[in-house]
Image: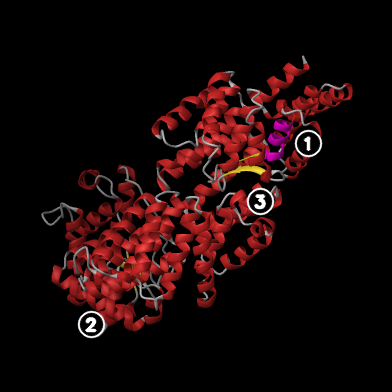
Amino acid sequence: MQKTEGDSHVQTLHLGRLDAEQVAHLVQRVSGRDPDPELVDLIVDKTDGVPLFVEELTRAIHETGGVGVNVPSSLSGALMARLDAVSPDAKQTALAASVIGREFEPALLAASMPEAPAELDTCLAELCRAGLVFESGHHKGHYVFRHALIRDTAYQSMLSSTRKAQHANVARALMKLRSAEIERRPELAARHLTEAEDWAAAYDRWRAATEMALSRSASQEALANATETLKAAQKLGDEKSPQTIVGNLLLGRSYDSAGRLPEGIAKLKEASDAARHSGRTDLAADAAHHFADSCMMAGQRHGQAISLCFEALDSLPPTDEVRRCRLMAQIARAYMFIGDFAEGTKYGQQCMELAARLGDHKSRFAVMMTRFGAPFVARQGEDRLNWRKNLESMHEVAEKLGNIDQGRDRTLSLFVGAEMADRQLVDTSLKLLTEISDKDNHRQLYWVQIHARAMVAILDGDFERAETYASEAVKIGRQTHGAHVEGVYGVQMFTIRREQARLHEVAPVIKRLMSDSPGETSWKPGFGLIAAELGFREPAERILNEIADTGFDLPQDAMYSTTLSYLADICVAVENTHHAQTVIDKLLPYRDLTITAGATTVCTGSAARRLGALAAALGDWDTADDLFETAIQVDTAMAAPPWIAHSQAARAWALRRRGRAQDLRSALSLEAEALATARELGMVSLRSKLEGSAS
């Protein structure tokens, strides 16, 4: 430890409390002689084995020549005694350095001291000899306080007014000596400006730091910086001041980025209300834009988002084309989410024309997403045919944006790949989504990635792994999105439990969801399917008839094709041929596609399997044959063994129903293959049905 070039070789270790033997060893190293047992007992008693206190108390005792009245009774007293023992210039140097931080650079220290000692190097050398600082082993030429508590003691010993003035000096020195670095990292100066209570300058720097952190998806850093921005803003004005509105805006965006959507939406609404009441049309537009974006991620409050965006759009001058473009993008997307595809298309087209002229990639991407946000049946004919080309165009625009938008792009690609039966696209998109969410530790994207993994595990027939992912995802989602993520979890667990012949376990949950939202019809078909599969034909048929009485007026949302597939399964289970043709007509556009719920919720295999079963129920055997052929091709393309087995079993059921001799032979072959898969994957429900057929 006695190296002539100083302590630059020293590495920091974190120590626990020392026992008596360790204290004795440390005292011996500091004093150079074996300590008396009484001295060791005294030091242990006063320090409780805290390493720094042991060392400082030992030094203090050693310098007094033994146990005496000058022994400090507290750690701060011991540390202050060390500071008081050096020369006045060295002590002043230590105090000024403590304002910079635990580690400091001599050039910055000198520039921040109005009356820097003529021999600053001599003062630093004295502090090193006193064991208060040492040369950094990581940054050449820098010095480090030997312990954070030494720095804290020096810092707290200064008068408040002196500390504030010195923080202002450090901020000025930073901006003079490291102007380029401060441009890149404004938070370095912002911290000192805050301590100096220069609120206007601190606000500007914290605001810039927050914007930079958001631009690179540094969510936690953005959240910390935004909190400081708002604190500085509140020192400058009330809740309706422009600075406070911007502070709330940045905090709301940071909550969103950090995956805390409910808090983000609340803050953005607060910013919107304040901006509208204060007449700041520019800030009201910004707040409405970000509020709508967070609502899209949360999957809620789309109507309110549309209202705020329209109000902001009407208030903006025609010359503010950038904000107008972004508001129209949000309006188009929100309309698509609530199923008003005509209005969504209208505002989407207007936005795309303006965005192309402005070079606004962000707005273009938002509108491009809407092409895939609507159910397949609601998409324009060109969008249905050119889905791959549209997807590639969206990729190109997303590559020009930040990681969050790239993550959204990958999420939509995964959904499109699943629905269009392109397993390679599914796997590639999941891989890229994982890379983005892991790299930035983005909680929203991580939630999407995990429940996407549950979806893929279901495709693979690994139901145990799927349940693990679904359970992990719902825990994350409750934090990032709120209680409504139970819907995603519910659909995934419904699918898993259905294969495990455990639907009775989820029936109470579905019934509660129906009771909690009596006007919501989305869970009713699922409950009807549970009833049908558990043998309760009457309630299952009653639910089918109730939905038929509405003209099968189903919401064209993310669950549209899944809801139709449930109704198809109910028709077959309860042998209701009266409604079968209507369900076929509605499901027929999905003939060559899969049934996929939500962006990354669940893919339950080919729509053609359900269509084939309905056709067989109606006795349309040629059509049924053709549809089952398509179903097996689609499920094979998706490399989805559970859904291949279901398509084989459904085809065998139809063949047995037709009843020709060659049909029975073909049915036995299909059932043997399906049964082998069902046994291997633990598909209890399908296995039971097939074993019953075999017997």
Q: Amino acid at mark 1?
A: Thr
Q: Earlier in the sequence, mark 2 or mark 3?
A: 2
**Which structural element holds mark 1?**
helix
Q: Is residue 20 visible?
A: yes
Q: Residue at x 61, y 26 (%)?
A: 500
Give the residue number, with chain letter if any, for mark 2.
Answer: 117
Q: Which mark is residue 417?
A: 3
Instruction: Look at mark 1 in the image and give the residue it sits on.
Output: 623
| SS under mark 2 | loop
Q: 55 or 143: which is nearer to us?
A: 143
Q: Residue at x 78, y 25 (%)?
A: 671
The one of 105 and 467 positioned closer to us in this rendering = 467
Rounded to the nearest whole Å, what is the CA distance between mark 2 and mark 1?
A: 95 Å
Question: Whole-percent x and y of residue 581?
Answer: 67, 34
* In-front residue for pair 585/525: 585
The residues tagged by marks 2 and 3 sit, at their Cα atoms, a distance apart of: 69 Å
The verdict on residue 303 being magenta is no
Left or right: where 341 falls relative to 155? right
Prevailing secondary structure of the magenta residues: helix
Query: Is 267 or 393 nearer to us in this picture?
Result: 393
Where is residue 622 shown, x and y percent of the image? 81, 34
Residue 229 seen in this snapshot: no
User: On the rendered structure, is 578 left or right of 9?
Assistant: right
Q: Secondary structure at mark 3?
A: helix
Estimate the x, y position of residue 687 in percent, counting from the top left. 70, 23
- If you read the primary sequence from the N terminus, does the residue marked by circle 2 or circle 1 appear first? 2
